[in-house]
Image: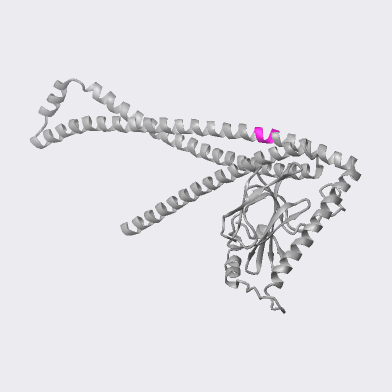
Amino acid sequence: MRTFYLKTASVLLVLALAASFATAQDLETQKREKARLEKEISLIDSQLKENSSKSRNALTELTLLQKKISNRKALIAQSDAEIRRCNDKIYLANRQIARLQARHDTLDAYYSRLIRGAYKNRDAKIWYMYILASDDLGQAFRRYGYFKNLSNEIRTQAQKLREAREELEAQKRQLAALKNEAESVKAERKKEYDTLVGDEARSKVVVNNLRKEKKKYQSQLATKKKQMEALNREIERLVAEAMKASKPSAGKKKVEVDYKLAGEFASNKGRLPWPVEGPVVDRFGQHFHPVYKSLTLPQNKGMDIATERNSAVKCVFNGVVQQVVVIPGYNQCVLIQHGNYFSFYCKLKSVCVKAGTKVTTGQEIGTVDTIGGETQLHFEIWQNDKPQNPELWLR
């Protein structure tokens, strides 16, 4: 039976430690996520300021605002979860204080009775007379033992009472700290919510402006569509050219495709590093305009990542630079081949590689440019002649 209880206690201890470790990990993850969201919001704010002063592109402004609002809501959701955790801890702390208070009161009452009893018999002569009045030696020893034990019991109870009082005070201090933490989180949440209301109001103004000046923004959209179509045609040509080189033809040397490298690239799906840090502001695929619901936006065969000015752009995997080209609206672009996979990096201000350069994962290939108030990297991944959703490939 004793072995059973020991095993049970061990299992409960392991479970408690595992739960504590998991909670610590969750909190650390949430801290990192909060830092990421706040960094993205700061970056979006700078881009919104840049866009307002330079391009006045309402669609860009709306896209950035919507991303900012999404991040702000995520932060508020985190604050709500933190407030719930604090309230749970406060509830448990109050229960613990109630238990400790009851224990303290019980010890205090018992100690008071002991002290009163000792006070009544405080005259040592009475103690001696009580011992000497014993019927025999055995009774005398028992009476002596009783007085000795009473003295020890008073000291022991005094110690227990001090410990109980200290534990109670410590728990009350912890409760006060938890209440302060909860108030701090609530204040932070209110601040986030007030800012969110402001962002949503600004978003409504942008939407109204878009509706009022439909022709102007349709013209901007048409320009963007032409630029993206030109980009799509160019990358299709570059990829086709690279793949054609791997096929035998008269008078030309066949370039072998590194299928081993392609296999390594494929096996890292979902684990590739990001080419730059920042929020995704335009995703892969065909999407409808956020205001003109019946109007489709140009098909994005990659993704656009907002980032800081002059950010270093890094290669996502080992490979060979196939081409460095300039495309209207996208500035300098770099195509890197990874076997029969390709990664494409656009809107670069400077490039530090050239065609034929072997590159490694994480190697800098250039810096991102600021075009019309937008500091964004356009990034694509292709398998042969088929564009892939980059977000599924990046970690």
Q: Which residue is situated farthest in the left direction here?
A: 137
Q: Is residue 125 above or below residue 314?
A: above
Residue at coordinates 10% horizontally, 27% vertically from top-left? 132
**Main secondary structure along the magenta-highlighted residues:** helix
Q: Whole-percent x and y of residue 56?
A: 80, 39
* Relative horizontal placement of residue 54, taking residue 161 as reference (left or right): right
For the C terminus, the image quarter is bottom right
Is residue 297 visible in the rendered structure shown here?
no
User: Which residue is more in the foreground, 76 or 262?
Assistant: 262
Q: Which residue is situated farthest in the front direction here?
A: 251
Is residue 74 visible in the rendered structure shown here?
yes
Region rendered in magenta: 190-194
Q: Is residue 98 above or below residue 233?
A: above
Q: Whole-percent x and y of residue 110?
A: 32, 30
Residue at coordinates 37% horizontally, 53% vertically from top-left? 9
* Relative horizontal placement of residue 61, taking residue 132 as reference (left or right): right
